[in-house]
Image (tube, rainbow, N blue to C red):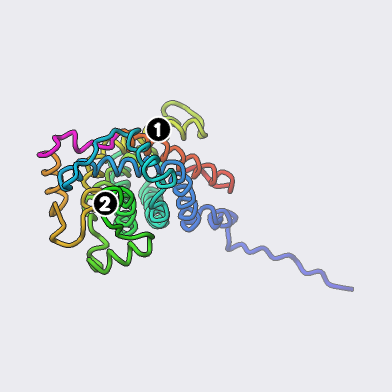
Amino acid sequence: MVEKKPIVTDTKTPLTENVEKRFIDTIPCTYILSVLSATAAELITYPLDLTKTRLQIQGELAKTQEVKAMHRGMLATAFGVVKEEGPFKLWCGMSSIIYRHTIYSGVRVCTYDYLRTTFGHDNLPVWKAALFGVLSGCFGQWLSNPADLVKVQMQMEGKRRLMGEAPRFLSFHQAFVDIYRRGGIVGLWQGSVPGLQRAALVNLGDLTAYDMTKRFLIHKMEMEEGPLAHILASLASGFVAAVAATPADVVKSRIMNQPTDERGRQVSGSLDCFKKTVEAEGYMGLYKGFVPHWMRLGPWTLTFWITFEQLRSILGGAAF
């Protein structure tokens, strides 16, 4: 007769621990979903980012080039790229921004989620959420600055060729190596200060405004957690981010686009660029590219958060 052994249950491991160890609830999973969602958002909105960068540098080109740069609006700039360079040039530099989001979006979302969870997720005051958004954005931007620098310079290559200038590089790797050879490690962080300023303001609108708006809609307006709340919170966060970050984005784009050698530089830093932009173009020069910036951030945040939230839901995770 075979003796039946009693089933031993490990009483030291509580049932809730299995839930806590689900992959969907881990930082690596949040990181992966953030990168996938950011990539989806970029595929849809990247042409607006390229148009925005061209508009922001348009005034600077008019001052620095012997041939006067044509001043165009948003639609004229986009159609001009299609007509003069080809439709696929609207995605010029796309590889660099995917590299950037592999670091930037994953780091900022995971950092914010970790900070708010660790320091009071249920009773998070606005000032603390704002602080977490700023810190998360700065950390992600600092790590991803080299890829951001390459993206800006690659976006301007088509314009340089049309103006009769020799191309600087043809690929992300070539651009990265070229910038490193000319400026060293420090050169890869050219424009990092205005980049950090922009990231702080963007994430104040993106992460913080999204989180706070969704909380308000659900807890104060008694709206159910779902696509409608996500859409409204995304639209609000995109507008706040665009208003707050466009001046810093203009400064960042212009500093990152200039050559790294001292002879080729037109500005010495973010404050100098800010001052010269206001002197030459007025305060509204700081909001060049605002419409495409807003039109990009709106759909970008919408696509990002809807994708992110839906992926978490499909995998059985809680909403962000």
Q: Which residues are magenta?
A: 279-290
Q: CA distance from mark 1 to mark 2?
A: 41 Å
The one nearer the camera, 279 or 319, is: 279
Say if mark 1 contacts mark 2, CB within 8 Å: no
Identify which residue is drawn at 54% across, 46% down.
311
Where residue 94 sits: x, y (%)? 41, 51
The disc placed on residue 164 is: 2
- Amino acid bearing label 2: Gly
Q: Is 249 contained in the magenta span? A: no
Identify which residue is drawn at 27% across, 64% down.
179
Quarter of the rendering occupied by the N terminus: bottom right
- Using the rendered image of the protein, determine whether residue 250 is visible from the camera's viewpoint: yes
The disc placed on residue 221 is: none
Where residue 245 sits: x, y (%)? 26, 41
Q: Earlier in the sequence, mark 1 or mark 2?
A: 2
Residue 147 occupies quadrant: bottom left
Tell me if mark 2 has few (under 14), some (14-19) or many (20+) residues whose alpha carbon lies within 10 angstroms of its own.
Answer: few
Residue tagged 1: 235
- Amino acid bearing label 1: Leu
Identify which residue is drawn at 36% across, 36% down.
238
Where residue 200 sits: x, y (%)? 27, 47
Residue 51 occupies quadrant: top left
- Looking at the rendered structure, the secondary structure element under dot 2 is loop
